[in-house]
Amino acid sequence: MFRVWQLQVNQFLLPKEGAQVSECEDAIGVNAAAGRFAVADGATEAFDARSWARQLAHGWVATEPPLLTREAFGAWVAEQGSVLHDAWQGRVLSWYAEEKARRGSFAAFVGVQFELGNGTPRWTAIALGDSCLIQRRGALVCRALPVADHQQFTSTPLLVPSLGGLQESTLAQARVESGAVESADVFWLLSDAAAEWFLRHAAEADGVLDRLDNLLATGQAEELASLFQRERRTRRIKDDDVAVVRIVVTGS
């Protein structure tokens, strides 16, 4: 039977405790018409990490054809890095900022493309770093990449550099995966702190993720912020920027 597939998309950004939204170094890219979504997490210690994260997330979802191979992604990253560094030219910087700028910027990245046309609907994702794609069916996590267990997060993830492009050894570790979609599957794109927190609650099956799902689905941004702030204060999640994209696939 022919089915019409649709995507319902919700997103949420929350800066670190006490920071302004304009200081958030996580970025979300949404191209619903193309079925393409991304999250990039700028490294706090890097120069102009917010701009690099936004350039990666916004640029990836807008690029045609979609960048779904390591080779295409690596070539595109090199181009985008040159654009970013050109934008820095002429800026008056302190000696400390100038030294950081010489080293370039860094970000984790994850992007997903949905194909909902003829045949079985599918998704393809590419990820480098510790921003994650998680596929949830009911209460079950079906897939999680590039990190699949909350205990596997580290303080030194691989990152996408703005300077010099991706080295072959780093690019080889980018995860490119695909899978099938069933109606009512929920896909999550999450920056690292939110991904680690999500996978921990998934393992504990304590109902917190159902509340997250409900708050996002109903657009309750203030309640979402309160949820994460409580989790930060009880140290269930580290105090870091939070980026969340919720994508529900339905077929009728």
Image (tube, grey):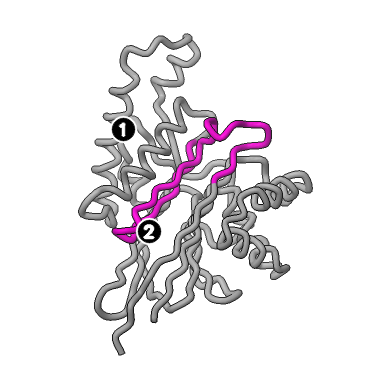
Q: Residue at x 62, y 31 (%)?
A: 19
From the image, which quarter does the N terminus lie in?
A: bottom left
Helix, strand or loop at mark 2: strand
From the image, which quarter does the C terminus lie in?
A: bottom left
Q: Position of residue 135 (x, y in %)?
A: 49, 68
Q: Position of residue 160 (x, y in %)?
A: 39, 40
Q: Position of residue 206 (x, y in %)?
A: 73, 68
170, above or below 199, in the image: above
Helix, strand or loop at mark 1: helix
**Residue holding disc 1:** 81
Between circles 1 and 2, the one closer to the viewer is 2
Q: Is residue 132 left or right of residue 223?
A: left
Q: Residue 24 colored magenta?
A: yes
Q: Residue at x 32, y 40 (%)?
A: 167
Q: Answer with the quarter of the image where residue 156 lies.
A: top right
Residue toward you, 87 or 18: 18
Magenta segment, which residues?
13-42
Tell me which amino acid carries mark 1: Gly
Q: CA distance from mark 1 to mark 2?
A: 21 Å
Tell me which amino acid carries mark 2: Val
Residue toward you, 166 or 91: 91
- State whether residue 53 appears in this view: yes
Residue toward you, 131 or 174: 131
Q: Residue at x 37, y 59 (%)?
A: 112
Q: Is residue 35 left or right of residue 64?
A: right
Q: Position of residue 21 (x, y in %)?
A: 56, 35
Q: Classify mark 1: residues with Cα within 10 Å, few (<14), some (14-19) or many (20+).
A: many
Q: Is residue 176 left or right of residue 17?
A: left
Residue most toward the bottom?
A: 1
**Residue holding disc 2:** 112
Q: Residue 243 colored magenta?
A: no
